[in-house]
């Protein structure tokens, strides 16, 4: 067996001789999950291209199809199975097709995916993303491969094929050591593994040299950054924290904006808030999921903070950065959530005034404590709460957008508006999507990577429009 650690291989006759390096056919990747999942897809695309694959024009034309999956909620998981059914059928008439399931469903289901979809060639967990080439070499020898063992993630030496030429993600910590009672992430993403600040800085310097202007530092719980790295300062604090990391990478030349996600209220520090306020490139946007506005529900979720602590974090952010945008994630209809508890979530949204909130109805997940609790709420309650919540989130977002009306905002141009080729689009520092005419009025067009001063003249709940003012 060529692999160890939770990995099995079944030997099948090779479908065809492996193609020579540099002419391996075409690939297609569909990404189902979060920013980390997207970042993994970009790295896997980079590996495929360095192996000689080129991007296919469509899913049904590709010689290799890779689904990078998500299992955060049941509907995310089910979507993959319907996509897979279609490809499995294609494989019956086209045995040279290589079918890969990567990401969090792959990690969760492992070998049982092969039983469910015997046409699969490779099932690989997220910790194996950087090893796609090694695993595919085994597939090319005619094996069906399952790689889901706990794995020390190799330093990211792969060159990602990034979807944007302006904004890039940089992983700083993999995995999650929290145990929120609803969440599958720790079981599918494994133990926390922080990258060294020098490696992160080096990657950012490389990105700046390629023309990238904005970096989002990524971790499922980014505030945990560094707690698995050794080192204590003379003052007796951990040497490696997110705050120290921001300070260490802030001056990379050419990078104009730095963001980070996802923040955890339990570990979000005043020191971090102060650093964000003091470091000019760190954008005034904070994504800090609160999940519930009720202390008893937060406790049942094992989140480790109270609503009051959350309030104090937001107050402190707004003291130091009055215009900061705040976004969050929230779950309604958690097991046992009463109507009164749910109303406290609404009240907190009303009170804080979020710029954006990702909402979800609770979905029971495999191997999580909350899924086994008896007080699950009926589907009708989930739907009703979610609808009411979404209406409130939109109303509050609209109120928050109103403050931009008439203002001059710095927009980093990302590309053309896909719905109107005469416009470009980009984001404010606070992360509001903004559209404005591509024509600069001086015979040139705004280009991706340009910073434009845009006078906002139309505001909507989740986007803005305006026109650029030439200096
Ligand atoms: N690490 C981040 C969130 C990761 S998952 C954090 O700690 O906040 C992204 C979001 O999906 C979560 O914030 C939560 O709102 C939602 N989510 C996670 N598990 C869920 C479940 N079982 N049902 C519904 N929503 C869920
Ligand atoms: Fe899931 Fe909690 Fe970890 Fe976020 S912090 S990924 S919600 S376990
Ligand atoms: Fe989904 Fe895995 Fe991300 S479950 S949300 S893709 S960490």
Image: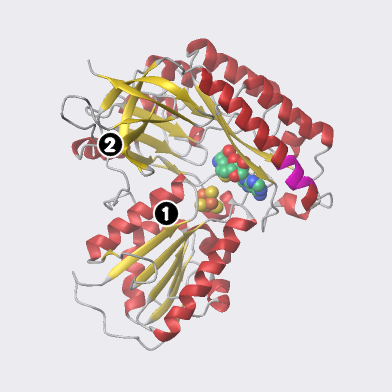
Q: Position of residue 390 (x, y in %)?
A: 65, 37
Q: Relative to residue 124, is residue 283 depicted above or below?
A: above
Q: Residues within 10 Å of mark 1 (few under 14, many from 20)?
A: few
Is 382 covered by the magenta stretch? Answer: yes
SS state under label 2: helix
Q: Quadrant of the C terminus?
A: top left
Between residues 306 and 207, which one lies in front from this camera angle? 207
**Quarter of the view holding residue 293:** top right
Question: Does residue 129 show up?
Answer: yes
Please say if the residues under marks 1 and 2 sit with CB atoms less than 8 Å apart: no
Q: Residue at x 58, y 54 (%)?
A: 187
Badge 1 marks a residue whose secondary structure is loop
Name the residue beneath numbered marker 2. 204
Residue situated in front as seen by the camera: 447 or 75: 447
The first of marks 1 and 2 along the sequence is 1
Q: Nearer the viewer, residue 216 or 134?
A: 216
User: In screen coordinates, is 402 left or right of 257?
Assistant: right
Q: Residue at x 46, y 74 (%)?
A: 87
Disc 1 marks which residue?
A: 152
Q: Is residue 190 visible?
A: no
Graded by Cα atoms within 10 Å as few (under 14), some (14 to 19) or many (20 or more), the crowding at tag 2 reads many
User: In the shown orientation, is residue 358 left or right of residue 124?
Assistant: right
Q: Look at the image and give the residue range highlighted in magenta.
A: 381-386
Query: What percent of the width, then of the height, locates residue 455?
Result: 36, 18
Q: How many marks?
A: 2
Residue drawn at (61%, 32%), measured in percent from left and top? 394
């Amino acid at each position: 067996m060529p692999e160890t650690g939770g990995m099995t291989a079944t030997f099948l006759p090779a479908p065809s001789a492996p193609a020579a390096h540099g002419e391996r056919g075409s690939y297609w990747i569909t990404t189902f999950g979060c920013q980390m999942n997207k970042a993994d897809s970009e790295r896997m695309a980079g590996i495929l291209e360095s192996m000689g694959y080129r991007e296919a024009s469509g899913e049904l034309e590709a010689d290799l199809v890779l689904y990078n999956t998500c299992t955060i909620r049941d509907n995310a998981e089910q979507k993959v199975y319907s996509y897979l059914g279609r490809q499995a059928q294609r494989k019956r008439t086209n045995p040279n097709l290589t079918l890969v399931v990567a990401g969090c469903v792959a990690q969760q289901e492992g070998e049982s995916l092969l039983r469910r979809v015997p046409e699969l060639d490779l099932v690989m967990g997220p910790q194996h993303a950087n090893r796609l080439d090694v695993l595919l070499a085994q597939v090319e020898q005619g094996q069906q491969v399952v790689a889901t063992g706990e794995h020390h993630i190799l330093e990211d030496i792969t060159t990602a094929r990034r979807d944007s030429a302006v904004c890039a993600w940089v992983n700083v910590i993999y995995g999650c050591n929290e145990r929120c009672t609803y969440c599958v992430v720790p079981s599918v993403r494994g133990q926390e593994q922080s990258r060294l600040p020098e490696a992160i800085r080096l990657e950012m310097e490389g990105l700046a040299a390629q023309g990238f202007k904005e970096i989002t530092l990524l971790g499922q719980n980014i505030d945990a950054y560094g707690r698995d790295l050794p080192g204590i300062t003379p003052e007796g604090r951990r040497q490696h924290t997110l705050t120290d990391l921001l300070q260490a990478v802030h001056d990379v030349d050419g990078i104009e904006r730095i963001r980070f996600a996802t923040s955890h209220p339990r570990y979000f520090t005043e020191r971090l808030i102060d650093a964000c306020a003091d470091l000019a490139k760190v954008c005034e946007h904070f994504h800090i999921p609160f999940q519930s506005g009720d202390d008893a529900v937060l406790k049942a979720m094992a989140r480790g903070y109270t609503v009051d602590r959350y309030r104090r974090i937001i107050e402190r952010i707004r003291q130091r950065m009055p215009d900061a945008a705040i976004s969050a994630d929230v779950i309604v209809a958690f097991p046992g959530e009463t109507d009164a508890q749910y109303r406290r979530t609404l009240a907190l949204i009303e009170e804080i005034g979020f710029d954006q909130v990702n909402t979800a109805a609770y979905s029971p997940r495999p191997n999580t404590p909350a899924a086994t609790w008896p007080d699950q709420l009926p589907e009708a309650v989930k739907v009703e709460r979610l609808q009411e919540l979404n209406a409130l989130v939109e109303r509050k977002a609209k109120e928050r957008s109103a403050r931009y009306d008439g203002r001059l905002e710095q927009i980093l141009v990302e590309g053309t508006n896909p719905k109107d080729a005469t416009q470009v689009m980009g984001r404010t520092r606070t992360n509001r999507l903004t559209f404005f005419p591509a024509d600069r009025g001086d015979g040139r067009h705004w280009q991706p990577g340009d910073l434009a001063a845009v006078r906002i003249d139309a505001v909507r709940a989740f986007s803005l429009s305006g026109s650029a003012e030439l200096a």
